[in-house]
Image (cartoon, rainbow, N blue to C red):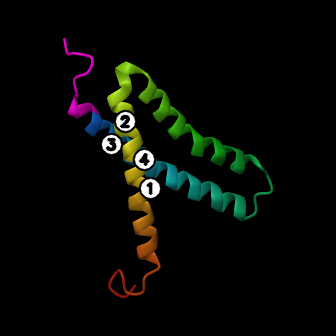
Amino acid sequence: MTEPGQLRGHLIVLGVVVGAVVCWIWIVLSLVLGFGAAYGNDSDVPAVIGLAAAVLPVVVGIVLLVRPRTRQFGAGFLMGISIGFIAGAGVCAALFVPGAFGGI
């Protein structure tokens, strides 16, 4: 049995990977819902779903971080979400730089 204060790196790394994947799914879902709301959908349902989708991963990460048994995975999960957003911002910025993708 492991000690309560012992670091288990595999849980943190797994949390980072899962958090980054969740972040990219989150970004795609937000784009789909945003375009659905912008083009011809007069309902407020996409906005409500988008708000719930924006809050849910952070709340799940905080809950995982607070519980002692899942604390290390939760820390990795929140780091993964942050890393995913930083990478997403880099990809978005690169799309607006002229010649960033070989002249596209």
Where is residue 1? Give x, y as percent. 19, 11
Quadrant holding the C terminus: bottom left
Task: List the residue tagged with mark 2.
Answer: 75
Pointer 1 and pointer 4: residues touching (CB < 8 Å)?
A: yes
User: Tag 4: residue type?
Assistant: Ile
Residue 94 image-quadrant placement = bottom left
Q: Secondary structure at mark 3?
A: helix
Residue ID at (46%, 69%): 92
Q: Give the mark nearer the N terminus: 2 vs 3.
A: 3
Packing grade of label 4 (10 A; few <14, some 14-19, many >=20) is many
Task: List the residue tagged with mark 3.
Answer: 16
Residue 73 image-quadrant placement = top left
Q: Give the mark nearer the N terminus: 4 vs 3.
A: 3
Magenta-tinted stretch = 1-11
Asked if residue 27 lies left or right of residue 98, the reply is right
Whether 80 is drawn above or below 9: the answer is below
Q: Rounded to the nearest whole Å, what is the CA distance between mark 2 and mark 1?
A: 16 Å
Packing grade of label 3 (10 A; few <14, some 14-19, many >=20) is many
Task: List the residue tagged with mark 1.
Answer: 85
Where is residue 63? Give x, y as percent. 49, 28
Q: Give the mark nearer the N terminus: 2 vs 1.
A: 2
